[in-house]
Image (cartoon, rainbow, N blue to C red):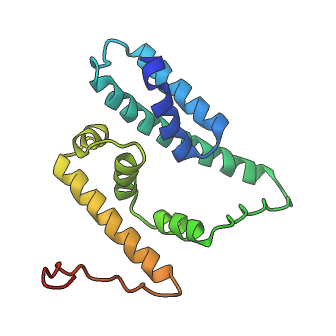
């Protein structure tokens, strides 16, 4: 199970925590949980979705721990120099995309990432998130629409003219 699913669980984790060593910690916790609860792990192929569910909860716990740790460090630092902000990427479209993604509702964003980045079906995402397939479809649709609207609002050039598809006229060559 570890060899079969390590790459997908690692990729899931790195996309959410953003730092390789922290993603490695998350993956280790996911598979440690699987080992501790081996009797609860479903048979193949459902174990992959079960691992995604554990990874989702582990990432959430990791974020809470990170926030608590930062708050404690902030309280302990007196008169410290603020951390430099993350440097913007060289691609302004990339920056706009990530800014727009940050504005999505968390449930919609997670459903969209599971469908697009992890290549899960709506049924698989529903199992990971513990909701209905219909709810996943709505979340993904809503996330795409909001992402599109946010990107269009941030684009200074406006919307490019998209040529309309015209039926082929057999009398014209």
Q: Residue at x 44, y 14 (%)?
A: 35
Residue 84 image point, x, y percent: 78, 62
Q: Nearer the viewer, residue 89 or 83?
A: 89
Q: Residue 142's spot in the image, x, y percent? A: 29, 65
Q: Which residue lies at the image location 23% right of the left edge and 59% below the top edge?
A: 138
Is 101 located above or below residue 13 in the figure? below
Seen at 50% across and 19% down, the residue is 32
Q: Which x, y percent locates residue 167?
A: 16, 79
Q: Is residue 95 above or below residue 109?
A: below
Does residue 61 appear in the picture of this structure? no
What residue is drawn where x is 49% and y is 26%? Answer: 6
Name of the residue lying farthest toward the top: 39
Residues 11 and 109: in front is 11
In the rendered view, tell whether residue 99 sits above or below residue 128: below
Residue 22, image quadrant: top right
Image quadrant holding the C terminus, namely bottom left
**Quarter of the image that includes the N terminus:** top left
Q: Position of residue 61 (x, y in %)?
A: 50, 39
| Displayed quadrant of residue 40 | top left
* Residue 88 visible (yes or no): yes
């Amino acid at each position: 199970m570890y060899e079969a699913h390590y790459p997908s669980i690692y990729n899931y984790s790195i996309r959410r925590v953003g730092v390789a060593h922290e993603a490695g910690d998350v993956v280790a916790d996911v598979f440690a949980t699987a080992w501790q609860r081996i009797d609860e792990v479903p048979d193949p192929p459902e174990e992959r979705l079960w691992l995604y569910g554990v990874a989702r909860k582990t990432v959430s716990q990791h974020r809470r721990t990170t926030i608590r740790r930062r708050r404690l460090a902030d309280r302990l630092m007196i008169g410290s120099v603020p951390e430099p902000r993350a440097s913007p990427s060289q691609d302004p479209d990339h920056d706009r995309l990530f800014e727009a993604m940050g504005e999505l509702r968390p449930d919609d964003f997670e459903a969209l990432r599971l469908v697009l980045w992890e290549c899960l079906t709506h049924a698989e995402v529903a199992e990971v998130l513990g909701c209905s397939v219909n709810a996943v479809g709505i979340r993904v649709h809503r996330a795409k629409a909001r992402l599109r609207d946010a990107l269009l609002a941030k684009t200074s050039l406006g919307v490019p003219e998209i040529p309309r598809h015209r039926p082929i006229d057999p009398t014209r060559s």
